[in-house]
Image (spheres, rainbow, N blue to C red):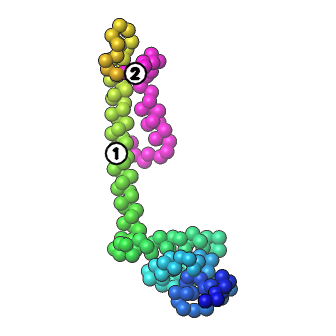
Amino acid sequence: MASSSYSTPCAACKFLRRKCVPDCVFAPYFPPEEPQKFASVHKIFGASNVSKILNEVPPDQREDAVNSLAYEAEARMKDPVYGCVGAISVLQRQVIRLQKELDATNADLFRYACAELPVAAAQFGRRGSAGNNGGGQFNPNYECYYPNSLWSNEDTSGKSEGN
Ligand SMILES: [Zn+2]
C-alpha cells in the first residue's frame, strides 16, 4: 500500500468512488478522516444538492454551511419526523422549565432573605443568646438587595414577558 497523503481522495470522492481532483468542491470540508460526515449528508441531502449548495454559498461561509448540513443530516437520521426541530423544541421546553425553576428559586430566596431580617436583628440586639439558629455573621447593613439585583440583571438579558 503505497499511498501518499497527496493522492488520498476526500471523504466525498472516496464514498462516490470517483477521482478527487485538485479543485474538488468537497475536499476542504469532507476530509478523509471523517467518512461518516459525508455519508450522512449524502444520505439525507444527496451529493449533487450538497455540491449545488456549496457552489451557491460564498467560500468563507462554506464550512459553516457544511457543518450545518452535517448537523441537520444527523438529526434527521436520529429523528426522521422532526429532525433538528425536535432537538430545538426539546431545548426550548427545557429553557422554559428552567426559567420557571429559576423564578421560583429567586422568589424563595427573596422570601427567605426578607423573613430572616427581623430574626437576625433580634439576635443581634441581645448578644447573650449565642446563635442556635446557625445564623452565621449578621451584617447590620444587610438588606433585601440580593434577589432584586438578580432580577435586575435578568431583565437586561432579555426576559421577554414579565409575570
Ligand atoms: Zn474530492
Residue 45 visible:
no
Q: Earlier in the sequence, mark 1 or mark 2?
A: 1
Q: Name the residue located 53 percent from the left edge and 76 percent from the top edge.
A: 34
Q: Name the residue located 36 percent from the left edge and 60 percent from the top edge.
A: 90
Q: Name the residue located 44 percent from the left edge and 80 percent from the top edge.
A: 44
Q: Is residue 8 left or right of residue 75?
A: right
Residue 6 x %, y %: 68, 83
Q: Is residue 125 left or right of residue 32?
A: left
Q: Name the residue located 36 percent from the left edge and 48 percent from the top edge.
A: 98
Residue 66 x %, y %: 55, 74
CB at mark 2 closer than 8 A to ligand 1?
no
Q: CA distance from mark 1 to mark 2?
A: 30 Å
| Highlighted magenta segment, given as a residue range | 135-163
Pair 1/2: label in front: 2
Element marked by disc 1: helix
**Label 2, residues with CA under 10 Å away: few <14, some 14-19, many ≥20:** few
Element marked by disc 2: loop
**Residue situated in front as seen by the camera: 104 or 152:** 104
Amino acid identity at mark 2? Gly
Residue 133 x %, y %: 32, 20
Query: What residue is shown with label 1?
Result: 100
Query: What residue is shown with label 2?
Result: 136
> Is residue 159 one of those drawn in magenta?
yes
CB at mark 1 closer than 8 A to ligand 1?
no
Q: Residue furthest bottom?
A: 18
Amino acid identity at mark 1? Lys
Residue 101 visible:
yes
- The answer to whether mark 1 and mark 2 are in CB contact below 8 A is no
Q: Based on the displayed image, in which of its 4 quarters is residue 110 positioned?
A: top left
Locate the N terminus by quadrant: bottom right
